[in-house]
Image (cartoon, grey):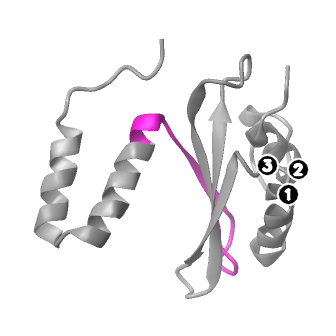
Amino acid sequence: MAKTAWDSFNEKFRTAPTPSEYHGWKYTGYELMTAVEKWAKRWPKDVAICCIDDAHFSSSSIVFILCWDKQTKKKLFGTSVVVIPQNSGQPCDFFMYPQHRQEMLLALRAMVKLPVDGFTKKILKFRNRKPKRFFS
């Protein structure tokens, strides 16, 4: 079975090899940020990194890693997201199914294009739609 970008990320940067044992990180802060940037070059189709500021007004990274079905590598399962603060402690991570990613994209687009009241209406309209089937 082929290794995915998320598998590679966890092997390289986590202190434990399996998801049930994820307790820590081999690096933190700027050291992790730079190591992840270097690692991401090997996964250009599966990884995107954006710059953000953390709570201490330090440049930090948010890493988006596409998670594909491990059997076929053709069906998108979702997106793992890792926030790496430069100076304010441990990274945190979360997972977005495709519908969560769509909602985040909609929110970001709406924040740029619409006033706050229009933004709220558009998000509510998106949330109240009939759910689509993403997985069989």
The secondary structure type at the circle numbered 1 is: helix
Relative horizontal placement of residue 10, taking residue 128 as reference (left or right): right
Spatial distance from mark 3 to mark 1, Cα to Cα?
Answer: 8 Å
- Please name the amino acid that badge 2 sits on: Lys
Q: Nearer the viewer, residue 96 or 106?
A: 106
Residue highlighted by disc 1? 39
Q: Nearer the viewer, mark 3 or mark 1?
A: 3
67 part of magenta stretch: no
Q: Nearer the viewer, mark 2 or mark 1?
A: 1
Residue highlighted by disc 2? 12
Query: Which residue is drawn at the image coordinates 86% and 38% (left, top)?
Result: 17
Going from the N terminus, do you reach mark 2 or mark 3 first?
2
Residue highlighted by disc 3? 43
| Location of residue 85 by image quarter | bottom right
Q: Nearer the viewer, residue 45 or 38?
A: 45
Q: Position of residue 98 (x, y in %)?
A: 46, 36
Label 3: few (<14), some or many (≥20) within 10 Å? some
The secondary structure type at the circle numbered 3 is: loop
Magenta span of residues:
84-100
Label 2: few (<14), some or many (≥20) within 10 Å? some
Task: Work out whether 113 lies above or below 54.
Answer: above
- Please name the amino acid that badge 1 sits on: Trp
| Location of residue 28 by image quarter | bottom right
Q: Are marks 2 and 1 in contact (CB under 8 Å)?
A: yes
Q: Position of residue 10 (x, y in %)?
A: 80, 45
Query: Which residue is drawn at the image coordinates 85% and 25% (left, top)?
Result: 2
